[in-house]
Amino acid sequence: MEKDIFCRIASGEIPADIVYEDDELVAFKDVRPQAPIHILIVPRKHISKLDDATAEDAELLGRLMLTAIKVARLIGIAESGYRVIANNGPDAGQEVYHIHFHVLGGRRLGPLG
Ligand SMILES: [Zn+2]
C-alpha cells in the first residue's frame, strides 16, 4: 500500500516545517494554513482515522492532545487562544487518512458551523 503523506513526513522522507517532534509524534506547519497559526500534529504510528483508534491507542490519543497544548505554548498562542480540531471521515472533510490534530490560532476564530 502506498504510504500517505503524513507517514512520509513522520519518517523524514518528505520535508516539513517541523515545530516539535519526539519519539511518537511530529508537529509541523500546514502548507495551506487556514489561520495565521496552523499546526498539524501526527502520530508516527499509522492510524487512518479516529474511528479506527482502539483502547490500545488511549495513551497516544492523550499524547496528541497534550502535544497540541505544548505546541500552542511553544508557538506563543496559549494566552491569546487556539482551537484543536480532528476531522473524521468525508462529512468532516478529512483529507489525509492518517490521524492528525489541527491547532489553529493567531486570530479570532469564528464559531463552529
Ligand atoms: Zn500514515
Image: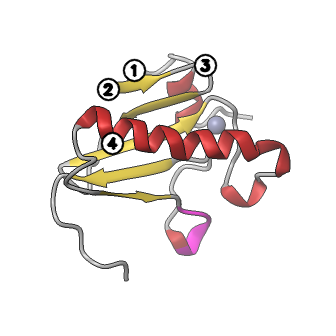
Quadrant in the picture for the N terminus: top right
Mark closest to the chain's N terminus, 4 or 2: 2
Q: Which residue is mark 4?
A: 72
- Say which of marks 1 and 3 sits in front: 3
First to last magenta residue range: 87-91
Res 25 seen here: yes
Query: Front-most of 93 and 38?
Result: 38
Q: Residue at x 55, y 75 (%)?
A: 91
Q: Quadrant of residue 23?
A: top right
Q: Residue at x 84, y 50 (%)?
A: 55
Q: Which residue is mark 2?
A: 17
91 lies above or below 74: below
Counting other residues with Cα less than 10 Å from the Cα at mark 1, is it few (<14), some (14-19), or many (20 or more)?
A: few
Helix, strand or loop for disc 3:
loop
- Callout 2 touching callout 1 (CB < 8 Å): no
Mark closest to the chain's N terminus, 4 or 3: 3
Question: Of the numbered discs in the image, which one, if any, rests on residue 23?
Answer: 3
Query: At which x and y percent is residue 61?
Result: 65, 46
Res 29 seen here: no
Q: Which residue is mark 1?
A: 15
